[in-house]
Amino acid sequence: MEDSETMTCPYCDDKSRECKHVLALFDSNFGDVYGGYLEKDNTAINELEKALSDLLNQGMNVKLGDDPLSNIWEDAKADYSVVEVNGEKIMETYVGLTTYMQYIEEFGLEYDAEVFVLEEIDEMPGMSSQTKICYAKDPKYTLDQINKEIIDSIRIAYSNKKKKK
Ligand SMILES: [Zn+2]
């Protein structure tokens, strides 16, 4: 792990933490995103929320293993709701940035994204927090691929469950 003073972008050697490769500057415990692509553009999150709502609307109620994917899915299930606006049904759910970034930390390397720890802050016992930075060759590409993998994984888990019956 590199020291935060010398942390440079693996793609362009930038030190400002503001180059186009910063996917997110975030706090890993509280899910706050302070900078980078994800702070400016939440299209990827909105698209994932919409895709997860569609799966839930189709009744894909499958239980997944205990990992970052399962956390995203369980949160989406818990927050899923259908509201009716002017006679039109609108499905909604929520994707938390904490679990989303955990997923990227675990699987991002497959899609040219890597997470580094910048600093660790111990505010009080049991309340430590880590500031991390995620660099990606092309943040939009990484997020699109990650979203696709999340949706595909849930679909596959659901169809496997149906085959067993
Ligand atoms: Zn860069």
Image: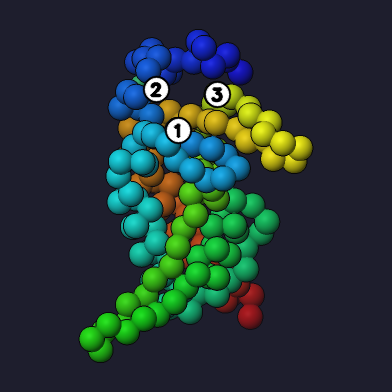
Label 3 – label 2 distance at C-alpha: 11 Å
Residue bearing mark 2: 17
Please report the residue visible at 38 percent of the width from the left and 53 percent of the height from the top.
45
Point out the image quarter for the C terminus.
bottom right
119 up-or-down from 96: above or below? above
Asked whether mark 3 and ligand 1 are closer than 8 Å, the reply comes as: no
Please report the residue visible at 30 percent of the width from the left and 27 percent of the height from the top.
20
67 up-or-down from 4: above or below? below
| Residue 158 in the figure: left or right of residue 145 | right
* Amino acid type of the residue that numbered disc 1 sits on in the rendered structure: Leu
Q: Residues within 10 Å of mark 1 (few under 14, many from 20)?
A: many
Q: Residues within 10 Å of mark 3 (few under 14, many from 20)?
A: some
Residue bearing mark 3: 118
Query: Quick one: which residue is furthest to the front in this view?
Result: 124
Query: Quick one: which residue is furthest to the right in this view?
Result: 125
* Amino acid type of the residue that numbered disc 2 sits on in the rendered structure: Arg
